[in-house]
Every structure is written in C-alpha cells, then in structure tokens.
Image (cartoon, rainbow, N blue to C red):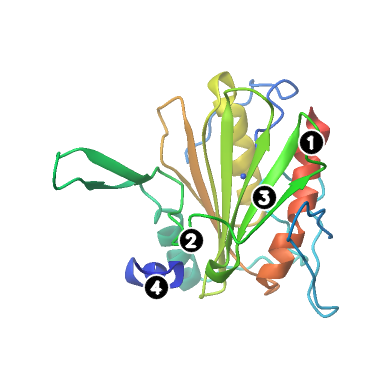
Amino acid sequence: MLSFKQNFYITGTIALIALAACSSDSPTTAGSTTIPNATAEVSSSSESPITSSSDRKFIIAPNTENLEVSDEERAILDSLAKAFPQKYTIDQIDGMTRFINYDAQYNFNTPIPEEMFNIPKEDDPYFCSVGVHREESGLTRSINTNSRRTLQTTTLLTPDNSIAYLAYGEIGSSVETVKNLFLTECEATNGSFYDYYPNDGKVAVACAVKNFTGFPFETIVSEQQNLCDNDYKSF
C-alpha cells in the first residue's frame, strides 16, 4: 500500500466545536508541550519556530506575517484540498461495498496510531484524544463529549512544504457554525478551502496551507495541546 507521500505525488500532489456554546447564526460560505497519557513524547528543537494557536480550533497559526502564495503554489494547494474524497473497495466474493475512508478523511497505512495521548486528562468527561502516525507525518484528533455527535480532524504534513487540515463528522445543527469557523481559520492562513458536502448535513471540509515557516512535524504534534485546550475551554 502506498504511503501518504507517495499517494500525494500520484494524485497530483480533529474536535467538536463548542456545540453548546457556539451560535449557528453565521452565514454559509462556499467551501507547546503535550500531556501524554502513555508513550507520547513530544519535543521540539530550540530552532523550531513554535507557533501560537491563540483561540484557533483547527488550523495552526503560522508564526509569520508573510502569507504570500504564488500561483504555482496555489494550484498545488487547491489540488491538495480536493485530494481526499471517499474511497472504497468492492468485495470480490459478495459484491459488498467496503468503505476505506469517507470524504475529508485520510486512510493511514498504519491504522493503529504509533502514539496516543489525551488532553487534559483521561478521566475527564470532556477530553481531546490525539493519535500520532509519525511515519506518515500525520495525526488525528477528536474530542470526547460522551455524546453521539463526533467530529474528527486530521493533519498531514506533505513533502512539498504544505499542510493539509481535514475535518469530518455528523454534528447536527452545528454544521454551519463549524464550517464557517473552519473556513475563517483557513482564510486567515491564506489556505485553499474545499467543501465536500456543500448541501448536506455533514461536515467534510479540507484546508491546504503553505508551511510558511517550515516547522517540522514535531511542532505540529506539540501544537495539539493548544488546539485541544481551546476546544476544552469552550464547554
């Protein structure tokens, strides 16, 4: 099976959002240090540009004011944002459809994360769970609220100096609120936004951004505490 880096070149290149606290009146548009509970061990070089996610919930704010994207880079970002459609196989014996992943989700070659950690703590009814797929430069994040509404976010660092942010879930009446928030954070990072379900009651969105400051995967992992804390504090 191809790795993400191979898949990216061949194709052309996590978090419930304060459902009780956010308003859904927004109009529709378009399209640190971690706290491990087990083996997760996050470290960053002193030379790595550490970012601050402020109150962001999806997309890490780059540590620079220069957000220039060339036409060539934009074409790559646009392609990357659209590169995660639903994928499935047909069982050769019974003809059944076997879904591998859904829109705005990535099918990791290593289905079991190499590292797992929860924020703020495992026994809290609201905690953020992060699974790290280090060999594929990706991670998934979800927030546990003891409810049936779920939203999973995925972050992938690609070989061409881009970062793909994906969000997928069924969250009822909060769909537009979440989409608008995701889009706002994407636009603030000069990213390419894509909505896989523009007229459906699901969230399946992607944002591809240029890795402006070139921060490594370790920084992306370490920033998950900021993003998780922002979700947690919303409840």
> Considering only order in the chain, which callout, 2 or 4, is on the residue closer to the N terminus?
4
Name the residue rendered at 67%, 37% in the picture.
143
**In terms of image quadrants, where is residue 167?**
top right
Q: Which residue is mark 1?
A: 232
Residue occupying the point 86% across, 78% down: 46
In three-dimensional space, the C-alpha distance between marks 1 and 4, rounded to whole angstroms, equals 35 Å
- Of badges 4 and 3, the one in the foreground is 3
Going by the numbered disc 3, the residue's amino acid type is Val
Residue marked by disc 3: 130
Q: Amino acid at mark 2?
A: Thr
For the point 47% across and 69% down, the residue is: 71
Q: Nearer the viewer, residue 202 or 192?
A: 202
State the residue position of label 4.
6
Q: Nearer the viewer, mark 4 or mark 2?
A: 2
Label 4 near label 1: C-beta < 8 Å? no
Q: Position of residue 199 (x, y in %)?
A: 40, 28
Q: Which residue is mark 2?
A: 110
Q: Please name whichever residue, 163 or 187, is drawn nearer the observer in this view of the structure.
A: 163
Q: Determine crowd level at label 1: few under 14, some 14-19, many 20+ residues with C-alpha closer than 10 A.
A: many
Q: Are marks 3 and 1 in contact (CB under 8 Å)?
A: no
- The label nearer to you, 3 versus 2, is 2
Mark 2 or mark 1, earlier in chain: 2
Quadrant in the picture for the C terminus: top right
Residue 212: give its label. Answer: none
Q: Earlier in the sequence, mark 1 or mark 4?
A: 4
Where residue 201 appears, x then y in whole percent? Answer: 45, 24
Rounded to the nearest whole Å, what is the CA distance between mark 4 and mark 3?
24 Å
Question: How far is the residue under mark 3 from the one under mark 2?
Answer: 15 Å
For marks 2 and 1, give the one nearer the viewer.
2
- Amino acid type at mark 4: Gln
Q: Amino acid at mark 1?
A: Tyr
